[in-house]
Amino acid sequence: METGAQKSHLPERMLTVKEVASIFNVHPNTVRRWEKKKMLTSYRVGPRSNLRFRREDVLALLNSSRNE
């Protein structure tokens, strides 16, 4: 059994373009544009190199956009 000090070895679940678009209430193409402009860090995963985003990166962008 794991305690609070131990971390799970399971990989974190990453967000899809569609999920990020839903969080920001924008079109998925807007998320792709942000990724190309390096406003949002992305990762390519799987054999099809699908775009994925870390939840922490998305929340950081969301918080920075709220502070402007």
Image (cartoon, rainbow, N blue to C red):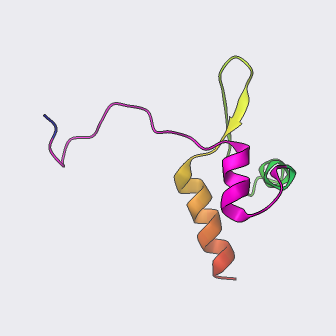
Asked whether residue 32 is in view, the answer is yes
Residue 24's image quarter?
Answer: bottom right
Residue shown at 74% from the left, 58% from the top: 39
Residue 23 percent across, percent down from the top left: 66, 60
Q: Nearer the viewer, residue 4 or 24?
A: 24
Left or right: residue 7 versus residue 61 is: left
The furthest residue to the top? 47
Q: Residue at x 20, y 41 (%)?
A: 6
Q: Is residue 50 left or right of residue 63?
A: right
Is residue 64 found inside the magenta-colored segment of the image?
Answer: no
Q: Nearer the viewer, residue 67 or 1?
A: 1
* In this view, 28 is above or below 6: below
Region in magenta: 3-28
Say which of 18 and 4 sits in front. 18
Residue 2 lies left or right of residue 25; in this view the side is left
In the rendered image, residue 22, in percent from the top left (x then y), is placed at: 70, 57
Residue 62's image quarter? bottom right
Position of the C terminus, as image quadrant, is: bottom right
State the image coordinates of residue 21 (x, y, percent, origin top left): 73, 55
Picture coordinates of residue 28, whole percent (x, y) = 81, 50
Give the overall secondary structure of the magenta segment: loop
